[in-house]
Image (spheres, helix red, strand yellow):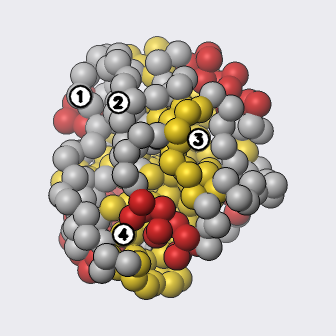
Amino acid sequence: MILGVDHIALSVENIVDGVKLLDKFGLRAKFVQEGVPNHPAKRDFLKCYEPLHSIAYCQSEGSVSVELTQHSQPLCDALSPYQVLLKRGLSDTVAFIGDLSSWGKAWRASLGCIQPVAALSSLFHAQFWYDKRCDDLSSGFIRALLVPVTDLSVSEKFWVRGLGFRVANHGSISGGRDWMHITFRGPVQAWSLSLVLVDGSEAQPPHYLDDSGFPCLALISSRLNKDRELALEMGSRGASSEFCLVVADNPLQIALLRGPDNELVELIGFSPK
């Protein structure tokens, strides 16, 4: 079963600079590891496969962790695969140019955001959101995620019946778009997350682990193979085989999934040493 949310991935071109910036916002690097092998099972989930990549696991009290990932693919300013609402704005940002008004309305309706603003981080080339009128001073870094979907019922089946989220609320915004607020409540707060599904979007192209922004959400699994199979039954577009990855001397079992709208989900199981 899915036990909780481990982290959201954030792409970066320089792992050291990324760690320094996140540290200013209360995310402490538990470890930084360069030269981590990229298993061949990840080939279909990367635009540019290279045998090695670098990662930094950054934790903040009260919300899910952020895993910085440095791949070889150059980053560019673009919409993030996962729309991420931070509890406060970053310091190296400019306004994001583009009409994201429908997603802003969904943030307001589902979570009560007063003035959601789409911004762009210059260092990460990452588009993200924060509430300009309500700087959240509570602990943590990430408030919620948003996924634009083409069929709300299909996405609900994947996220709720497949991955164990629960429906908290739902409604509609002007323009006829329906939204659904779903949550995962883990045994500790840092494993918990709110996620908003917004219907009526165009079909998304496949996302990749080396895309700019926040490309992948990682979940903790106690029975990885069964959770992988259940996700496939509940609407996943496909999955990698299971593979082993040793991170900070810990052997992990990994499987990657594509959701019904091409969102990337990583399942992490812990292996005995």
Q: Nearer the viewer, residue 103 or 182?
A: 103
Residue at the disc numbered 4: 198
Tell me whether the residue at label 3 lies in contact with that at label 2, contact meaning CB atoms closer than 8 angstroms: no
Above or below, 156 against 271 in this view is below
Cβ–Cβ under 8 Å for marks 3 and 4 = no
Residue shown at the point (61%, 61%) measured from the top left:
115
The residue nearer to you, when weighing 222 against 83, is 83
First of labels 2, 4 by sequence position = 4
Residue at 46%, 29% in the rendered image: 125
The answer to which of marks 1 and 4 sits earlier in the sequence is 1
Across and down, in percent, residue 225 comes to 32, 58
Tag 2: residue type?
Asp
Q: Of tags 2 and 4, which is closer to the observer?
A: 4
Residue at 29 percent across and 38 percent down: it is 208
Indicate the quadrant where residue 273 lies. Answer: top right
Label annotation for residue 66? 3
Depth check, mark 1 against mark 4: the one in front is 4
In the rendered structure, the answer to whether residue 208 lies left or right of residue 269 reads left
Q: Secondary structure at mark 1?
A: loop
Query: Disc 2 versus disc 4: distance between alpha carbons?
Result: 24 Å
Say which residue label 2 marks: 210
Q: CA distance from mark 1 to mark 2?
A: 7 Å
> In the rendered structure, which amino acid carries the disc numbered 1?
Lys
Q: CA distance from mark 3 to mark 2?
A: 15 Å
In front: label 3 or label 4: 4
User: Which of pointers 1 and 2 lies earlier in the amino acid sequence?
Assistant: 1
The answer to whether the residues at label 1 and label 2 have Cβ atoms under 8 Å apart is yes
